[in-house]
Image (cartoon, rainbow, N blue to C red):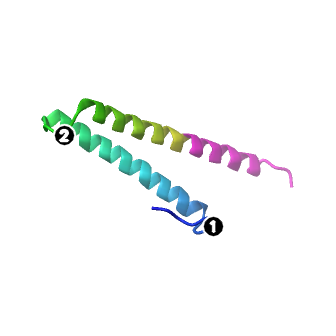
Amino acid sequence: MATAVGQGGFGSELQSSIQRINRLQQAANTKAMAFQAGEPNIELNDVMVDMQKASVAFQMGMQVRNRLVTAYRDVMNMQV
C-alpha cells in the first residue's frame, strides 16, 4: 500500500494510520481467540508477537494524538 509523496493530506494519512492500528488489533484478537479455541496451526509466540505489534501501534497512535493536542493548544495560546 505505497503512496507517492505529496498525495493526499494529513487527515487522510491520519485516518489510514488509525485504520492500520485497528486492523492490527483485530488480527491480534482473532488470533488470540483462535489460540484459545485450540486451533492447531496457531502458536502462542505468534499470538504474543501480534498482540505486542498491536500494543506498540496503539501507543504510537496515542503519542501522535498527544502531540497534536499539545500543538493545537500551543497554537491557540499564541498571541496575535
User: In terms of secondary structure, where does tag 2 sit?
Assistant: helix
Where does the image place residue 2, in percent across and percent down from the top left?
49, 62
Quadrant containing the C terminus in the rendered view:
bottom right
Q: How many marks?
A: 2
Name the disc covering residue 6, or none.
Answer: 1
Quadrant containing the N terminus in the rendered view:
bottom left
User: In terms of secondary structure, where does tag 1 sit?
Assistant: loop
Q: Amino acid at mark 2?
A: Ala
Against 56, residue 74 (above or below) is below
Where does the image place residue 40, in percent across and percent down from the top left?
13, 37
Q: Main secondary structure of the magenta part?
A: helix
Label 2 neighbour load within 10 Å: few <14, some 14-19, many 20+:
some
Q: Which residues are magenta?
A: 63-80
Look at the image and say whether residue 50 sits in the magenta stretch: no
- Residue nearest the viewer, comparing 22 with 72: 22
Apparent side of residue 62 relative to residue 78 in the rendered image (left or right): left
Name the disc covering residue 34, or none.
Answer: 2
Which residue is depicted at the point 31% across and 41% down?
Answer: 28
Which residue is depicted at the point 85% across and 50% down?
Answer: 79
Where does the image place residue 25, in percent across and percent down from the top left?
36, 44
Q: Quadrant of residue 54?
A: top left
Which residue is depicted at the point 25% across and 37% down?
Answer: 32
Apparent side of residue 78 relative to residue 22 in the rendered image (left or right): right
Where does the image place residue 78, in percent across and percent down from the top left?
81, 49
Against 24, residue 44 (above or below) is above
- Residue nearest the viewer, comparing 33 with 39: 39
Look at the image and say whether residue 74 sits in the magenta stretch: yes
